[in-house]
Amino acid sequence: PNAVIYADNAIPIHGVPGTSKERTFIAVKPDGVQRGLISDIIARFERRGYKLVGLKLLVPSKALANEHYADLSKKPFFAGLVDYMTNGKAPVIGMVWEGPAVIKQGRVMLGATDPTAAGPGTIRGDYCLTIGRNICHGSDSAESAEKEIGLWFGGKGEIVNWTANNDEWVVS
Ligand code: ADP
């Protein structure tokens, strides 16, 4: 209802929720990278028709992981979670995907946080077993997407606005 149509060069880096320019932050965590699942996870979003507008491989700093998971800082598993994300045994793939309802649908595609509750056909339901090694992350709301995209892709030029040749067949 509050959708604003932006000129292509004026899309905010976090996108425009509720439009075909909605954006979310999706990550392949170190266990997903270590297990060779990057390509599968990318392929699922790409084949569905979502557009990749940001992509990087990095070992996140402790400051980045602490901020990313700030809401969980009081949880008993927090220190272990930050260590798992930042210890450098494998890097993280950070991505920004764009398209209709990508925040909600990204979460559906990932599956439940606890893989023992994730349905078959979801990423977690197909590839993992425990909540401490659930291989992927996706923003859970427009507010989280805005925060996380800004945090992981704050640098100038790290998000690319582009037109896919098949847009008229996918998002019209
Ligand atoms: P999601 O990643 O689905 O948004 P949460 O925000 O609740 O889920 O948790 C963030 C991450 O913290 C989870 O994906 C998982 O890696 C880790 N985590 C959550 N709960 C636990 C737990 N009980 N034990 C270990 N790790 C957990």
Image: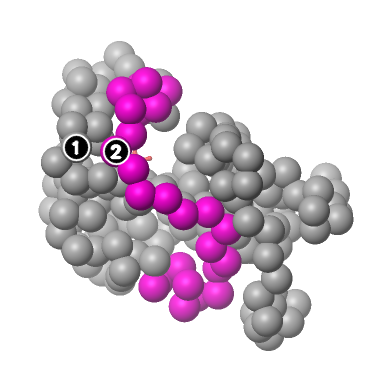
Residue 172: x and y, percent? 75, 77
Identify whether 41 is placed above or below 113.
below
Q: Is residue 107 left or right of residue 83?
A: right
In-front residue for pair 75/99: 99
Question: To which residue does mark 1 refer?
Answer: 88
Tell whether position 119 is magenta: no
- Farthest residue to the front: give it: 156
Quadrant of the rendered image holding ligand 1:
top left
**Visible residue check, residue 109:** yes
Residue range (magenta): 43-67
Residue drawn 24% across the image and 64% down it: 37
Residue drawn 70% across the image and 71% down it: 163
**Label 2 packing within 10 angstroms: few (<14), some (14-19), many (20+):** some
Mark 1 lies on a secondary structure that is: loop
Q: In the drawing, what numbered circle is on residue 59?
A: 2
Q: In the drawing, what numbered circle is on residue 143?
A: none
Q: Amino acid at mark 2?
A: Val
* Labels 1 & 2 near each other (Cβ < 8 A): yes
User: In which quarter of the view is residue 73 placed?
Assistant: top left
Label 1 lies in ligand 1 vicinity (Cβ under 8 Å):
no
Q: Amino acid at mark 1?
A: Gly
Q: State which tag comes first along the sequence, 1 or 2.
A: 2
Q: Is residue 112 left or right of residue 146?
A: left
Tell whether position 44 is magenta: yes
Residue 164: x and y, percent? 66, 75
Identify whether 71 is placed above or below 91.
above
Q: How many marks?
A: 2
